[in-house]
Image (spheres, grey):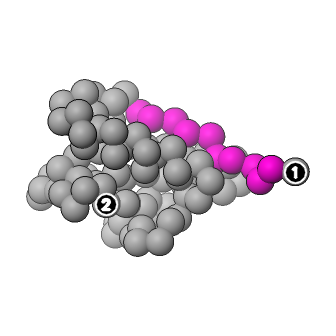
Amino acid sequence: MPAKKYELYIKTSARKEMRNLPKDVLQGVHRAIRSLRQEPRPRGCRKVRGREGAWRIVVRKDYRVLYMVDDTAWRIEIYSVARREKDTYR
């Protein structure tokens, strides 16, 4: 029997950010997001300070995918995809 997968939800704000990414970066982001369905806390992920249940993963060194994990509902909510800058962690 296959393992249960998490449901992915990408907020509108994150979708807008993704539209502005270079094509090669976007492909890496899509791959990383899809892999979260199997493993919501992969090796190298970090908790986001000041936001309960928030995590981040790094894509191509300069980009961050910020997301919330709800283990009881088997749901992952992507709330930001941005280049690493001061305003990434909002």
Residue ID for mark 1: 1
Please state which amino acid type lies under the numbered disc 2: Val
User: In the picture provided, is 83 more to the left or to the right than 3?
Assistant: left
**Local crowd size for mark 1, using a 10 Å CA cut-off: few (<14), some (14–19), many (≥20):** few
The answer to whether 10 is drawn above or below residue 85 in the figure is above
Residue with the most extreme right position = 1
Residue at the spot 55% in from the left edge and 39% down from the top edge? 8
Q: Which of pointers 2 and 1 lies earlier in the amino acid sequence? A: 1
| Residue 64 picture quarter | bottom left
- Image location (x, y in percent) of residue 35: 52, 51
- Which residue is at 35% across, 44% downward? 29
Q: The residue tagged with tag 2: helix, strand or loop?
A: strand
* Any part of residue 80 in sight: no
Over which residues does the magenta segment extend? 2-11
| Residue 21 rendering spot, x and y as whole percentages | 20, 36
* Label 2 environment density (alpha carbons within 10 Å; few <14, some 14–19, many ≥20): some
| Residue that protrudes farthest toward the front in the picture | 24
The residue that appears at 37% across and 60% down in the rendered structure is: 57
Q: Amino acid at mark 1?
A: Met
Report whether residue 45 is seen. yes
Task: Give the camera-side residue of 69 and 30.
Answer: 30
Q: Nearer the viewer, residue 61 or 51?
A: 61
Q: Secondary structure at mark 1?
A: loop
Q: Which residue is mark 2?
A: 58
Classified by dominant secondary structure, the portion drawn in magenta counts as loop
Q: Position of residue 39 (x, y in %)?
A: 59, 59
